[in-house]
């Protein structure tokens, strides 16, 4: 069995740290670019599919939009009532005034 001597930590390496960093940056840019392209394609496909569904089913689309608007309005109304009750509770004294 041949014994391999340990590498000299001060010996020059094949690539400098700057070269390795440049390669890593280039690889990262390529990965991000590929991911962005896939995301763009997915969003475009979803938008096209949604537009086709809306055109094919306008009545159902209107019902869904109306339902969503009613849900949002109901949530906003409920939140305003809760805030109003909180303000009223904060305005009322928590300790009764002393009896004279």
Image: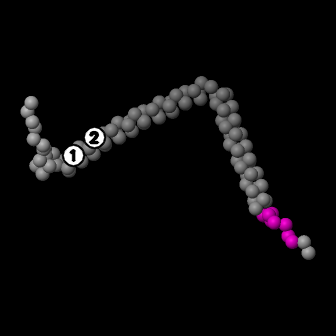
From the viewer's perspective, is 85 left or right of 3?
right
Q: Where does the image place residue 44, in percent across and percent down from the top left?
A: 46, 33
Q: In 3D space, how far apart are the residues under numbered discs 2 and 1 (Cα atoms)?
A: 11 Å
Q: Tell me which corner region of the image, top left, top right, bottom left or bottom right, holds residue 75.
A: top right
- Can I make out residue 1 in this image? yes
- Residue at horizontal 69 percent and vertical 35 percent from the top: 67
Q: Which residues are magenta?
A: 91-98
The residue sitting at the top extreme is 56
In terms of secondary structure, where does tag 2 sit?
helix
- Residue at horizontal 31 percent and vertical 42 percent from the top: 28
In terms of secondary structure, where does tag 1 sit?
helix
Q: Where does the image place residue 34, in percent across and percent down from the top left?
A: 35, 36
From the viewer's perspective, is 76 left or right of 24?
right
Q: Which residue is labeled 1 in the image?
A: 20
- Residue at horizontal 78 percent and vertical 59 percent from the top: 89
Q: Residues within 10 Å of mark 2 (few under 14, many from 20)?
A: few
* Residue 24 or residue 89, whichever sits in front: 89
Q: Which residue is labeled 2 in the image?
A: 27
- Can I make out residue 12 in this image? no
Magenta-colored stretch includes residue 25: no
In the rendered image of this protein, does residue 42 appear above or below residue 15? above
In the rendered image of this protein, does residue 49 appear above or below residue 96? above
From the viewer's perspective, is 60 left or right of 95?
left
From the viewer's perspective, is 88 left or right of 31?
right
Q: Where does the image place residue 62, in percent across and percent down from the top left?
A: 67, 32
Q: Where does the image place residue 76, in percent across and percent down from the top left?
A: 70, 47
Magenta-colored stretch includes residue 95: yes
Foreground mark, 2 or 1, reads: 1
**Which is nearer the N-term, disc 2 or disc 1?**
1
Q: Which of the image's four quarters has the C terminus?
A: bottom right
- Residue at horizontal 69 percent and vertical 31 percent from the top: 63
């Amino acid at each position: 069995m041949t014994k391999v001597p340990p590498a000299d930590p001060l010996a020059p390496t094949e690539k400098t740290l700057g070269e390795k960093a440049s390669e890593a940056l280039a690889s990262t840019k390529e990965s991000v670019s590929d991911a962005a392209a896939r995301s763009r394609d997915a969003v475009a496909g979803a938008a096209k599919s949604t537009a086709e569904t809306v055109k094919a089913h306008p009545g159902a689309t209107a019902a869904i939009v109306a339902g969503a608007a009613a849900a949002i309005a109901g949530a906003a109304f409920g939140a305003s009532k809760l805030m109003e009750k909180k303000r009223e509770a904060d305005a009322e004294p928590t300790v009764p005034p002393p009896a004279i």
